[in-house]
Amino acid sequence: MIPRPFVALAAIAIAGCTQTPRELARAQQASATAAADLAKELAGLTPSNSTTCLPPFPTTQVKAFGPTLVYVVSNGVKYRSDTAGGCERVGRGDILITRTPTGQLCRGDIATTVDSASRTFSGSCSFGPFVRYSKSGK
């Protein structure tokens, strides 16, 4: 039999991990906002087949929309990767750091994020496949 103090501590620990209705509503709103902003970012572009690795291209901008990262090659070409989450702070200005043994960023590679002001670790994520979005005919 488990002593009562341990049962009470376990109940407190479990309760501390659940979201309050306010936190849940805030998370749902943030998710809806990220989805709407992502739709605006990719508006007018057509997705093509996904690829395992990003092709090499000149320096680009990276934007975060919730757990989704978008690499902007040009106004007419962008690559989307749905991550496992953890790099959302790129959307607030954190620095995305990738280390690639092959020289290409590929599905399954892990990136870390660093706070741009304090230079402290702020998160990490694993990349999913990369989907190319482009204007029709490009």
Image: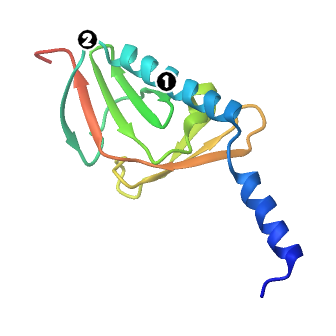
Residue at point 50%, 29% (across, down) = 64
How far from the left and from the top, in percent, is residue 43?
Answer: 30, 13
Q: Position of residue 18 (x, y in %)?
A: 68, 49
Q: Image check: 6 left or right of 137?
A: right
Residue 93 seen in this snapshot: no
- The percent position of residue 136, horizontal first and vertical second, equals 14, 15
* Image quadrant occupied by the C terminus: top left
Element class at badge 1:
helix
Foreground: 61 or 35?
Answer: 35
Residue that carries the numbered disc 2 in the rendered image:
44
Q: Give whichever of 82, 24 is nearer the camera.
A: 24
**Which residue: 85% across, 82% down?**
3
The answer to which of 56 and 5 lies nearer the viewer is 5
What residue is at 28 percent from the left and 46 percent from the top?
53
Q: Would residue 1 be seen by someone viewing this image from the given angle? A: yes
To which quarter of the image does residue 101 belong?
A: bottom left
Q: How would you rate the neighbour count of disc 2 (Cα within 10 Å): few for under 14, some for 14-19, many for 20 or more?
A: few
Residue 132: x and y in percent read 24, 31
As drawn, 87 above or below 73: below
Residue that carries the numbered disc 1 in the rendered image: 32
